Image (tube, rainbow, N blue to C red):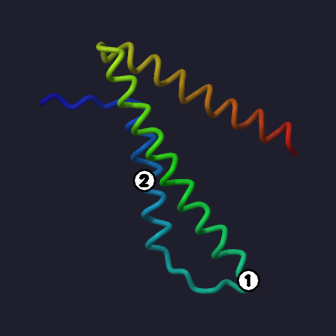
Amino acid sequence: MKLKLTPLNIVSAVFLTIAVLLLLEDNKPRGTAMYLNISGILIGFSFLVAVIAFISDQIFRRFVPELKKIWILESFFVFFTVLLIIIIKVSVS
């Protein structure tokens, strides 16, 4: 079995690691209850991004057979997703 490392695999692994680290983090009160609420939201968001990245990677692998093309398409997908998030954040603020 040949391992195919792709950009969405990397994104998925990074966000899964972030979620696990946030879960294992010491949740002692830091003066306000707001810290615990934001931490819980970040854990949920990190797991959601990891799952979406994994599913998207499987879809790309299903329809694009060549590893080089997968790298190109997934890199553009990640870039435009980050760009869209930045544009939405700037326009809302």
Disc 2 marks a residue whose amino acid type is Leu
Residue 32: give its label: 1
Report the residue at 73% width, 36% height from top: 86
Disc 1 marks a residue whose amino acid type is Thr
Q: How many numbered marks have been drawn onto this rendered protein structure? A: 2
Quarter of the C terminus within the rendering: top right
Measured along the vertical axis of the image, is residue 88 above or below residue 35? above
Going from the N terminus, do you reach mark 1 or mark 2 first?
2
The x, y position of residue 30, in whole percent, is 67, 83
Helix, strand or loop status at disc 2: helix
The x, y position of residue 42, in whole percent, is 59, 60
Quarter of the N terminus within the rendering: top left
Report the residue at 57% width, 54% height from top: 45
Quarter assignment of residue 57: top left
Residue 16: give its label: 2
Residue 91: give its label: none
What crowding class fits label 1: few (fewer than 14 Cα within 10 Å), some (14-19), or many (20 or more)?
few
Helix, strand or loop status at disc 1: loop
The x, y position of residue 61, in whole percent, is 33, 23
